[in-house]
Image (tube, rainbow, N blue to C red):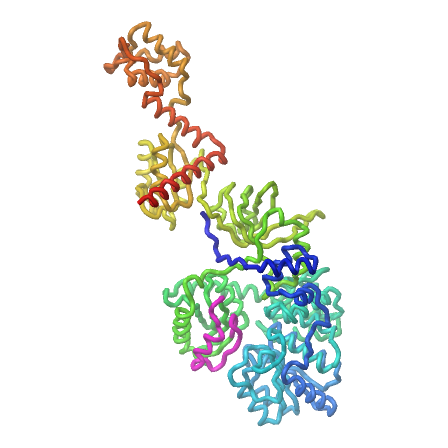
Amino acid sequence: MVKSKTRWKIEEIDQELALRLQQRLHIPPLIAQLLVGRGICTLEEAEKFLGGSVHDFYDPFLLDGMDTAVTRVKEAIEAGEPILIYGDYDADGVTSTSIMIHTMRMAGATFQYYIPNRFTEGYGLNEGALTKAAENGFAVVLTVDTGISAVKEAELAKELGLDLIITDHHEPPEVLPDAYAVINPKKPGCPYPFKMLAGAGVAFKFAHALLGEFPYHLLEIAAIGTIADLVPLVDENRLISKLGLKALEHSANPGIQALKKVCGIEGKVSAYHVGFGIGPRINASGRLETADRAVKMFITNNPEDAEKYAYELDMLNKERQDLVEAIAAEAEQLVLAMPEEETNVLVVAKEGWNEGVIGIVASRLVEKFYRPAIVLSVKADENKAKGSARSIAGFNMYEALTECDDILPHYGGHPMAAGMTLAVSDVPELRRRLNELARDWLTKEDYIPITKVDAVCRLADANLETIEQLERLAPFGVGNPSPRILIEDVEIVDLRIIGKDGNHIKCQFHQDGVTLDGIGFKMADISADLSLRDEANIVGELAVNEWNNQRRVQFILKDLAIPGMQIFDWRGTRGKADKLKALDGEVRARVVAFRPCGQEQLERQSASWRTLYLEPKPGTRQLVLYDLPRSFAELKEVLNACSTLERLYCLFGEEPDSLPALPSREQFKEVYKAVYQHKKLAHKDIPLLAKAKKLMPSAVSFILEVFLELGFLSDDGEVYELVKKTEKRDLTESRVYQRKKEALELETELLYSSYQSLRAFLKQLVLQDAGTKEKMYHGL
């Protein structure tokens, strides 16, 4: 048995709705089921999801405050009043700022932009920047991707005579800033139909409202910000991403062209390219220095400058990767040293950690330990700790931080990610409170990662046609993940460890005459738990592997389970001690030897074992058959003693029986004739008789023992003598004969059979034993 590493939650599909969509849209059943599973149940919703055009965007003036904001900006443009665009330093903030810059250019505004320094100013609006803006004569400050929590800063802006317009998408606090206008789809009372826009999406809607026409040329930048900010790719976010990715393929923007080049992106652009190529390079600028060069890359018209900025971002990203690896290693060591009561929510802090990458490190901790995590960079001289948080399903990080707001002078974010600043002296208290909240909010099961299974199918359904249909659901990302498929009862027919560092596995699955290639990235650790011919349930994603102009379906393995007992064929293995040592771990295992020689060998080795044992114990999950049992009863007795058995290892290292085959009835007759002729046979003459009859001495000895038991012969220890006037008896009446016959049959089944036969034989025995136990239980 191999248990899955995650909890599989299979989506329950309303089959009637799926059938209706399938018939109305003429789509395959799998696509219809996936649509319904994602909450797309009506014909209109499905058509919009599978198609989608600019006509499906909502009116930007449905955003509360948009009319007021646009009117004020137009007044400023007409009066020549300078406008300050105030942005943020992450990928969403950079793209939001860039969208607004392009918008103001087209609108003919007098403007400048400003992005705070992550290290000297921190996140969001700050009083120093507002004061400087007023001193420099700005009349309007327009925020993008920030400002919804800036209550004090809004008051200062009023005092300074600045008209503050906030465009944001983060969770609003209970008290909103008293700004000139606040645009946020999540704002209480806002009638906008879609609440999950990214900052870049809100900026895009503002551009649409201000310019009075759909800003096609800004779609590509909005798509980058939307995908990079990990907002759900549904509804309007899906439209922005889908149309924006298409625009990225043929972009005329010099900065985007240069960025695609350093990322090695050619041809079709996917959400993966943005999430793992473009986005990290934009983020690297703000994480290690300032985000200014990333903005300059998006807004320049000079291809040479664009290439220079893109190259610098690429170099910064490589530096960022090295920094993340170093800090993540230190953070993991701190977690491993924590007492158990502090591990429900991981809060780690250290002086000198780069503030720009601690969010990535927090994500690494969640990935490794599956616990909500906060990583804090400490400035001891200022008594300040600045942190980033990432969470897991069931633990709303924003709500948790709100419960601790008396020790958090500044915080904000989402249920799954947040940022905060606090006094260094309050870090232990924050850790204590969050762990206490987790004990109240979460169960033991919540700490097991969840894998949502979108559909269940047979191996035959995993074909190229299916994959082409699945592409209609793209772009994939948060809220619209790449479909996870469950295929049950597949046979593992090939298994290899691959990769430079031996981190991955390559395998093949077989079912009903169909074979499918599979690959499991960073899953080499499970290879020792698998055996060829295991019947597995596999969860993963379908993909196309293109090689030498050939397209083949490939299953990207994400998780695996083997529900039944596994049987490992170790027959003929040399180095039995090494094999046993490898099993001497956390899982309870028992080693059984049936013969004296094997028992002696095991007793000599057992002194060095930590968890292996020779005697039956409850809860045995692994069983090693060290040598050959001498009877079915012996084997059944051992299997009966291991009711919780998950894995059975067949070592069978003992030499086979000295009698390779049961003598025939004709050979029995020949030996009897020889004894009858001489009336007696000395023990020392057994080799001579064996030679004369062309038998092995062991075969002659066995025949004589059977005759002795049946009363045909007597034995004084030196001579076998014929007994006169005996009753006629069949050989099968001899227990010696029956035991030897059974032992040889068992030896054939266990030692000389194919793996498939061995597996079928042992599983049948286990099933018989289980059936016997069940009958006994119900009979009580």
Q: Look at the image and say whether residue 396 sits in the magenta stretch.
A: yes
Residue shown at 44%/70% (left/top)?
A: 347
Extreme residue in the left direction: 716
Q: Look at the image and say whether residue 617 sits in the magenta stretch.
A: no
- The magenta-colored residue range is 392-418
Q: Position of residue 205 (x, y in %)?
A: 68, 78
Residue shown at 33%/5% (left/top)?
A: 677
Extreme residue in the top direction: 677
Question: Between 777 and 560, which is closer to the camera in this rendering?
Answer: 777
Instruction: Specify the quadrant that holds the C terminus.
Output: top left
Where is 699 relative to 571, above or below?
above
Query: Which of the 4 image quarters holds residue 12?
Result: bottom right
Can residue 711 be seen in the rendering of this structure?
yes
Where is 101 relative to 658, above or below?
below
Give the side of residue 20 with respect to residue 685, left or right: right
Query: Which of the 4 image quarters holds residue 233?
Result: bottom right
Q: Position of residue 615 (x, y in %)?
A: 30, 42
Q: Position of residue 289 (x, y in %)?
A: 59, 74
Give the side of residue 453 with respect to residue 749, left or right: right
Query: Which of the 4 image quarters holds residue 511?
Result: top right
Residue shown at 68%/70% (left/top)?
A: 240
Can residue 373 be seen in the rendering of this structure?
no
